[in-house]
Image (tube, coloured by chain):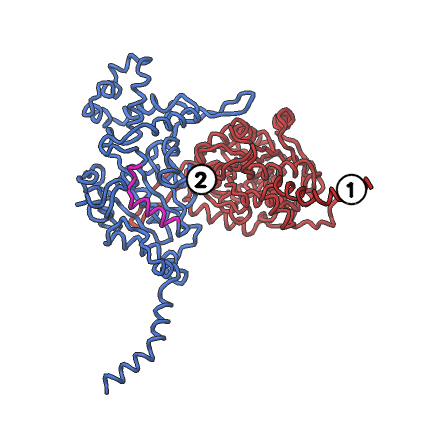
Chain colours: A blue, B red
Amino acid sequence: MLRKKNTQAAARLLPMFLVTLALCIPASHWAQQSAGKDPLPSWRDGQAKLAVLDFVRQVNDKSGPKYVKPEERIAAFDDDGTLWTEWPRHINQIQMVFARQRVKQVAKSHPEWKYQQPFKAILDDDDKDLARALTDFWNTMDLLRATHGGMTVDEFGSTVRSFVATVRHPRFKVPYTEVAYSPMVELLDLLRANEFKVFIVTSGGADFLRELSEPVFGVPRECVIGSTPEYEYRETQEGGYLVRKSNVETFNDKSSKAENFQLHVGRRPIFVAGNNDGDLALMGFAAGGKNPFLNVLIRHDDAEREFAYQDNTAKATEMARLRGWTVASMKNDFRVVFAFQQESDLP
Amino acid sequence: MLRKKNTQAAARLLPMFLVTLALCIPASHWAQQSAGKDPLPSWRDGQAKLAVLDFVRQVNDKSGPKYVKPEERIAAFDDDGTLWTEWPRHINQIQMVFARQRVKQVAKSHPEWKYQQPFKAILDDDDKDLARALTDFWNTMDLLRATHGGMTVDEFGSTVRSFVATVRHPRFKVPYTEVAYSPMVELLDLLRANEFKVFIVTSGGADFLRELSEPVFGVPRECVIGSTPEYEYRETQEGGYLVRKSNVETFNDKSSKAENFQLHVGRRPIFVAGNNDGDLALMGFAAGGKNPFLNVLIRHDDAEREFAYQDNTAKATEMARLRGWTVASMKNDFRVVFAFQQESDLP
């Protein structure tokens, strides 16, 4: 009897319970659930995925304490090592591959390069020597000046496009347009679907990445913030054009990433993804605002599917631990790394 | 008989004629016509209005020779004297009014200002002396350094917001948020409705205008390109913040407007509106591209409803004449100048 009575009471209460349940789950979550589609299928269930989904749900929840107005939903993503593979840095990182190719193309007019680093190492195809030479910041600047400047913005763009059309990743043997991390591309889509405005904040060249940002990441040229040369405006009878001078005007790394974010965007980001100490200022900038924020640090710990390395990550790792920022392990949190890898191949 | 036969033939041909007519008018134009709404009601019919409507129609016409892909529909607007009133420059221009108020607020800690221009002229309320002092570029820089720097980005923003909330235009006696030109606000709306991305490219301070660009012009903070100080990133236990240092890092005028457009946007504009020689490089940059473009030069020739002046316009006027760029006369092409002026008051 007791049993039956309880059952009847439960039956009476059930509709009310369902209504209450419905009211507790925000509409966007409902939409997601009812569509029955996981917006991050390349992520394994775990703390990182949960943190991301939770954050997106909360900034959307108008009645909750973490609601953020759409115009303030600004996301900043590092690219190299965060959105796509860059390792080993002086060997496989796309802009370095471009610079090395450029050096070989124009070496004939620079006989002195046989005796000058980092050019000598590039001409000798000596990767170890190159890596050593580029530990000197000024050698890197010399390489950028020699290969990225002294031409018009239009010429530079077409040079990069020609390069991208033919180059293959040395290890993965696919075009560089395919070495984006699938989980991160899904994350960009998820944020945009939730009214985030996404910027790429790279220490690489802005004009270089602008030739790739839209097709690979869906990020338009005007949302790329990066290192830049000095530009010089010139005119002919027909109209004006811009020259990329040979100096590096802005090297967009570390505190410059936060400073240039203000220059370009004029708002704090509330979502930052990066993979090393170079992204720490941008994460700190997000953390210092009044809005809720999420910082995600990508950990490269998957030698099998990508690479395992910890260079230049000591401070970022410590800060993430101290402040409870989210760490995404490529080995554990990424179900798929690259779209070209078959899931059946996965460990 | 002949007459009747012709009429019958015409009747038979009429449906075919109508179909042909329909096919010749692009869908967007049809939509506009059928909605029966003039998208630029504050413009008088004339060459300037026609040039704008024609350009917008043509970049939308996929089958026409002037079609432009939506992602390349980039518009750049000067603000002072183009989107809203700035005259007389050192007296009524909003940022100058702000600077003058700031000087008076902090003058107690600067006893030396009594003897230094341009501060002396401001403290003496001597507009003629101030105008004279500010013909020296470095006096203007000194004024900006003293009033816009040495505080955090957040502090600066709230200082500007407090100023904007209370200040009235000296001549028109309305808040500065109401001295936008109605025809230009309509033009911004028309472009956005046709998938243009609109940027404001000001020689004024980017962070200053960012407090006004969204509410007054519907242009988000991240689409404002302007003069900027050096920023410095600093950190506390809680997170990071940015300080506006006292130097002027970029003064965004003339060729810098084109150079900084590349820095921020990475594309050429195809629509530029300006009002003086400071906007000429940006117009030349648009003219030098492969896409069709429209440059519009606003002429201040309406002393009754606004101001009549030609300072700093000689080159721009000559270039517009030589290259056939569009000139919009405020007197002749603007049916309404400000929303607060009654149309019945108009000349």
Three-letter code, disc 2: Gly
**Rendered residue at 72%/41% (across/down):** B304
- Above or below residue B161? Residue B96 is above
Look at mark 2 in the image and give the residue it sits on. Answer: B149
Percent of width and height locating residue B208: 49, 43
| Circles 1 and 2 on the same subunit | yes
Pointer 2: residues within 10 angstroms few (<14), some, or many (20+)?
A: many
| Quadrant, the N terminus of chain A | bottom left
Residue B133, given in percent of the width and then of the height, sits at 57, 32
Left or right placement of residue B5 versus residue A276 in this view: right
Q: What's drawn in magenta, residue-wise?
A: A178-192
Q: Is residue A337 magenta?
A: no
Mark positioned earlier in the residue sequence (1 or 2): 1
Q: Which mark is residue B5?
A: 1
The answer to whether residue A189 is magenta is yes
Prevalent SS, magenta region: helix
Mark 1 surroundings: few (<14), some (14-19) or many (≥20) residues within 10 A: few
Letter of the chain that mark 1 sits on in the rendering: B
- Picture coordinates of residue B214, whole percent (x, y): 51, 47
Instruction: Please report, as a chain letter, where disc 2 is located.
Output: B
- Disc 2 is placed on an element classified as loop
Horizontal placement of A302 versus B234: left or right?
A: left
* Amino acid type indicated by mark 1: Lys
